[in-house]
Amino acid sequence: MSWNTVIGLEVHSELNTKTKCFCGCKNEFGDKPNTNCCPVCTAMPGSLPVLNRDAVERAILMGLAVGCRINNYSVFERKNYFYPDLCKAYQISQLEYPLCVGGGLEIELEDGTKKFIRLDRIHLEEDAGKLIHSRNGTMIDYNRGGVPLIEIVSKPDMNSAEEAVAYLQKLRSTLLYVGVSDCKMQEGSIRFDVNISVNRDGEPLGTRTELKNLNSFRAVLRAIKYESARQIEELEAGRKVIQETRRWDDAKGKTYSMRTKEDSQDYRYFPDPDLIPLDVTEEYIESIRKKLPKLAPERKAEYQKMGLTEQDATLITSERAYADFFEAVLKYFNEPKFVCNWITAEVFKKLNALEEDDRKISVTPQDLAKMLELYKNGEINQAGARKIFDALWEGETDPVRLVETLGLKQLNDTGALKAVLEKIIADNPKAVAELKAGNEKTMAFFVGQAMRATQGKANPKLVNDLVRELIK
Ligand SMILES: [Zn+2]
């Protein structure tokens, strides 16, 4: 009998509020260590937490975006553990009564199959400080301590590493659409924990392990494959899988035991006496629902109405940044299909060469619109358009000027092109015979020759027409 892999994911996502969750300190990455701290987030005796309304609102927004039920009554609890990154020796979190429950996301795999991944809950909590290990010892930065986080917990609905990654990509994309987190993996503003077990068909669920330290989609993919194979190997050898937390070592490509897994009772959760239960009225939820931005499915439908194929509409809405950029370009040059083709081919090619966190479109919508207009109107050809696009990406501006300075104006002069082609035709009787015999591939040869003779400026369509006319 074959093995099944069962995967559930916990995603921690920092909310991009101005201030921390329970005090007025700045929520800012990269500031000088321990400068965004106050008596509340450093747990000075007598200090009291005050809940940040904006954090609650962002958590609810995300809950609504993924179809959660928003609980009118939720409770902040203390999760007690002793570790230097936590000056209070407890983290304010939610256990029994979380803010959002249920909901889910539909994922699409590379082969086109779709699957609905259910969510268990989304709760609000605070982040811990950051430990920085160096040769001289360990240092602590409490700037991150108290930053609002949502923990998004899925049901164990995924059965392969590919499904888990598709889910994470969809979740990240949704967080970015809703605009509640910047989701920078390298800065730790989105972090993943994987729960994984294996079992055979018809058997109850196996003992699970939890994987930590997964900082990229690639790490998630590799870690799940490794850990699933490791568990199967243990069981097939007659050994047991131990319930534990394991650390992924990306360089070695292996997981290592960190500690046996705690159960929730180990944390002695209890309601925080400093914070009253959160009372969220239906009116309040509805007022937040009105702020929900247009998400991918709605935009996708709109784009299909503009004439994009489903595949193109899916690609261009896969990230909010792409969809926003697409719409911005259309404001200057309203040719949806033409614009979309350039973005999904040329812009994506540039972005895919970059790390996930660094994928920023470095061309302004105005400049791209102008360049595409020149291309569509035949002022420049595709090769010229690519050259201008490269220059724009490198920080140049003004495509009209670039056409001049780079000497890319397309040669549309019939007389001049005819002269060039007459010579090419005279020099290549064999190719002429092939074309006359109906070998259409030979046309590419003539276009290539014409491009060479004109330093890439010939209008390929015009070349095509003229060759046919001349060989008649
Ligand atoms: Zn503070």
Image (spheres, rainbow, N blue to C red):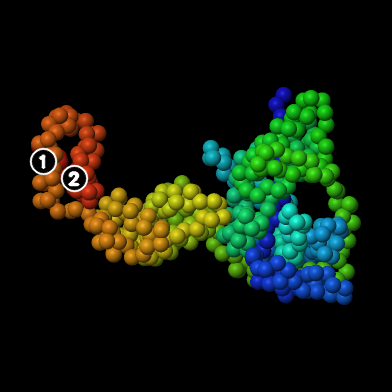
Q: Mark 1 and 2 residues: CB-CB less than 8 Å, in contact?
A: yes
Is the residue at mark 1 in contact range of ligand 1, meaning its CB lies under 8 Å from it? no
Residue type of the residue flagged with mark 1: Lys
Question: Quick check: 27 above or below 299?
Answer: below
Residue position for label 1? 423
Callout 1 crowding tier (Cα within 10 Å): few <14, some 14–19, many ≥20: few
Residue that numbered label 2 is attached to: 453
Q: As rendered, which of 451 and 300 lies closer to the eye?
A: 451
Residue 233: quarter of image: top right
Question: Where is the C terminus found, in terms of image quarters?
Answer: top left
Q: Where is residue 215 in the image (x, y as percent from the top left)?
A: 65, 49
Tell me the SS state at disc 2.
helix
Percent across and percent down for residue 148 are 72, 65
Is residue 285 visible in the rendered structure shown here?
A: no
Residue at 44% from the left image edge and 56% from the top image edge: 303
Q: Quadrant of the N terminus?
A: top right
Residue at image location 68% in from the left, 47% down from the top: 214
